[in-house]
Image: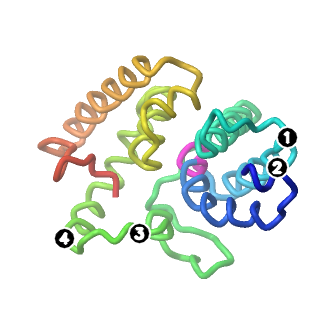
Amino acid sequence: MLAFQAGDARAFEVLVRRHRTPVFNFILRFVGHRARAEDVLQETWLKVVRSAGEYQAKARFTTWVYTIARNLCVDSARKESYRQAASLEAPVNGADGDEGRALGEALPDAGASPERGAHNARLRPLLERALASLPDEQREVFILREYSGIPFKDIAEVTGVSENTVKSRMRYALDGLRRRLAELGVDGDLAEDGRTVVG
């Protein structure tokens, strides 16, 4: 980012290549609509370009870009008269060969084992329903932590609350997910091999 600030246009290409997919996945899970997520992603990168002069190296670029993306997601949700979360099982209507595939299948795979993939395929729709039932601030922390791998300290900066509040929201989110999944007939803990099962 500092190179881009100094006028190196190629540095921006590196930033986009490095951060596009995780930021898009965060936005997609936040707004729930692929077309809106693509619009918000474009707005995010435009804002990065327009605000490049304001960036200060005291914050990590990742924290800064997720803060921009989160604020644009919140603005987008406010502009919408309704919020309808897309299931990861919903078919994708994309021009990039994803047509007919489920949204969850179109997201990049982190290389999970076939057994874990099968387990997650059964859990995914239930987890998405449970996740949609959480209050916005808990769902946001869960998505940033579990789907995007952002540390609690950085989530606190992105959301503008203390790290203890973030950890509290995560605890309530996990409790809420366990409770809702139990109501949906899923037994056991959300954790598998020490990690939350998110697909």
Distance, label 3 to label 4, CA atoms, is 14 Å
Q: Are the two marked residues, 3 and 4, in contact with CB atoms closer than 8 angstroms?
A: no
Is the residue 13 above or below the residue 40 in the image? Answer: below
Q: Which residue is mark 2?
A: 5
Q: Are the two marked residues, 2 and 3, in contact with CB atoms closer than 8 angstroms?
A: no
Q: Amino acid at mark 4?
A: Glu
Q: Which residue is mark 4?
A: 115
User: Based on the displayed image, in which of its 4 quarters is residue 189 positioned?
Assistant: top left
Q: Pointer 2: residues within 10 angstroms few (<14), some, or many (20+)? A: some
Secondary structure of the residue carrying numbered label 4? helix
Distance, label 2 to label 4, CA atoms, is 46 Å
Distance, label 2 to label 1, CA atoms, is 6 Å
Q: Which residue is mark 3?
A: 109
Disc with the residue nearer the chain's start (2 vs 4): 2
Residue 9: % across, % down = 84, 63
- Residue drawn where x is 36% and y is 54% of the image: 125
- Residue drawn where x is 73% and y is 33% of the image: 75
Query: What are the residue bounds of the magenta stretch?
Result: 27-32
Q: Which residue extends farthest left?
A: 188
Distance, label 1 to label 3, CA atoms, is 35 Å
Disc with the residue nearer the chain's start (1 vs 4): 1
Is the residue 48 above or below the residue 142 in the image? Answer: below
Distance, label 1 to label 4, CA atoms, is 48 Å
Is 145 left or right of 83, judged from the image as shown? left
Q: Pointer 3: residues within 10 angstroms few (<14), some, or many (20+)? A: few
Q: Which residue is mark 1?
A: 53
Distance, label 2 to label 3, CA atoms, is 33 Å
Q: Amino acid at mark 3?
A: Asp
Disc with the residue nearer the chain's start (3 vs 4): 3
Which residue is at the front of the view, 60 or 190? 60
